Amino acid sequence: MIKVGKWIAKHKVVIVIVSLLLLIPSFLGMAATRGNYDILSQLRYLKLSAGFSGDSRRSGHHGG
């Protein structure tokens, strides 16, 4: 583990370059994918599909 940490510290420029190169396909994939990335609408959908009411007294869960 220490050898890995020393290698990363010694080759930080290589790590940054590889990281930036890996961003290119991620941006291309994001641009090619049509979808709604609005997190709030996704959370509302999850709440409705799971039947979660947000109130633990009504859902039968009493904590602990």
Image: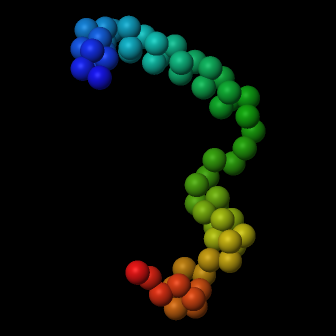
Above or below, 63 against 12 in this view is below
How far from the left and from the top, in percent, is residue 32? 73, 29
Q: Is residue 53 left or right of residue 20?
A: right
Q: Residue at x 57, y 88 (%)?
A: 60
Above or below, 58 against 16 in this view is below
Q: Is residue 53 left or right of residue 3?
A: right
Above or below, 62 against 10 in this view is below
Q: Is residue 11 left or right of residue 54?
A: left
Q: Residue at x 53, y 85 (%)?
A: 61
- Which of the pair 61/42 is nearer the observer? 61
Identify the image's colour scheme: rainbow, by chain, secondary structure or one colour.
rainbow
How far from the left and from the top, in percent, is residue 15? 38, 14
Quarter of the rendering containing residue 45 = bottom right
How far from the left and from the top, in percent, is residue 44? 64, 67
Q: Quadrant of the C terminus?
A: bottom left
Asked whether residue 55 appears in the rendered view, the answer is no
Q: Residue at x 66, y 23 (%)?
A: 28
- Which of the pair 51/5 is nearer the observer? 5
Q: Is residue 43 left or right of residue 8?
A: right
| Label total for image | 0
- Which of the pair 56/38 is nearer the observer? 56
How far from the left and from the top, in percent, is residue 20? 47, 16
Asked whether residue 21 appears in the rendered view, the answer is yes
Q: Residue at x 25, y 8 (%)?
A: 10
Q: Quadrant of the N terminus?
A: top left
